[in-house]
Amino acid sequence: MSADETPWDDAVGRGLGFLHRALGPAGLPSARPGADPELRRPLSGAEARRHLLVTHGEDLGLDPDDEGLSAMWGLALLRPDSGRAEERELVAALAPQVARYREPAARRYRIFPPGRPIPADTDSTAVAAAGLARHGLLAPAELDDLARELLDTQIGPDDGPIPAYWEDSDSSPARGRRYDAVAAANVLFALHLPGAVGRLPHPAAEATLRYVVEHLNGPRTGTLNYAAPEAFLHAAARASSVVPELTAPVRRAVGHVTTQSADTPLSVALLVLAGEYAGETAELPELRRRLAGAQLPDGSWPAGGYFRTGRLPLYFGSPHLTTLFAVRALRPESVERL
């Protein structure tokens, strides 16, 4: 076995094959919404909107059937300069797919395409930036502009963390500022990419760091937009690979996790990645064996709810999104490649 091979190479190859076969003219399929985190019954966009209206009396304002976060994570998770033709073709297809979610004439990205009544958000922007930069698709000047845009999210006297949404558009949230610890961790990672200008110290970045540390030191819970605690552990551990101030609190948080609590393939994959970034490696071989054993005959891993619509109980996931995380979790990487 060469230095680049792992015991899970066959599972990785079958996972990449599943993703490659799923490519269509618009790229990879979007995540599907569902009323429960397990996505036992995925809904169409129209069904999801009707479910919220009938069950909770809330109109989302759109049919959530075209989201870009999955494609953004695809770029952030797939390997650059891959020796596998299928993987290179996936990256080539995902780059223009991600571009569809960019705010016109701005360094911002949205989870739903422009024109929908939901504003650009810092989470999508940070994940898109990391994915594009990973594959050399973001020039240093563009990354510099994007980092400044993230740091300028603060409008007014608030000295708190960088919020989840920009507030200078007609579609900005009407209920005041919203914060999310996963988004905050993803923003910290993007601000510390090589070439970005948002490295500490900066008042907004420092407040965001404090917010992430507070969440790490608190109860093991999900966040406003992410139900699974593993989603936050993954985001915070990933940020710790470039923000040294997060190293100790991340290691404590990951070290306190019982690996058996990860009860879905998606949560196992996220926990593997959290452990890899944190340097907590003792449990990783067993977790990777569990993950490889959950692969389905078509090469995919089952859908699970990864993100949700804030306080409204609508969860999004897909076999494609789980498979992206699983493939990455089964291929350890060095910090230099992150």
Image (cartoon, rainbow, N blue to C red):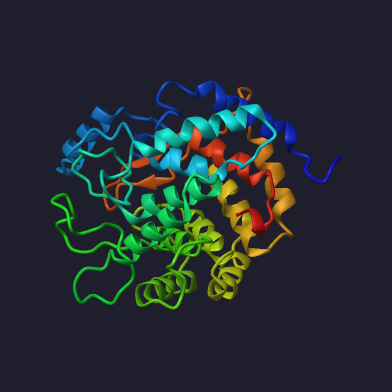
122 over 22 or under it: above or below: below
Q: Residue at x 55, y 59 (%)?
A: 238
> Looking at the image, can residue 302 be seen?
no
Q: Residue at x 62, y 39 (%)?
A: 327
Q: Quadrant of residue 89?
A: top right
Of residues 292 and 129, the one nearer the viewer is 129
Q: Quadrant of residue 101?
A: top left
Image spot of residue 103 (x, y percent) = 28, 45
Q: Is residue 297 left or right of residue 10?
A: left
Image spot of residue 253 (x, y percent) = 56, 68
> Looking at the image, can residue 217 be seen?
yes
312 over 205 or under it: above or below: above
Question: Looking at the image, how many numbered discs can be counted on the residues?
Answer: 0
Q: Is residue 117 left or right of residue 188?
A: left
Q: Residue furthest right?
A: 1
Of residues 15 and 57, the one nearer the viewer is 15
Of residues 278 and 157, the one nearer the viewer is 157
Image spot of residue 119 (x, y percent) = 23, 49
79 over 198 or under it: above or below: above
Q: Residue at x 52, y 32 (%)?
A: 92
Image spot of residue 231 (x, y percent) = 48, 54
Can you say which quadrant of the picture contains the N terminus? top right
Q: Residue at x 18, y 55 (%)?
A: 173
Can you say which quadrant of the picture contains the C terminus? bottom right
5 over 332 or under it: above or below: above
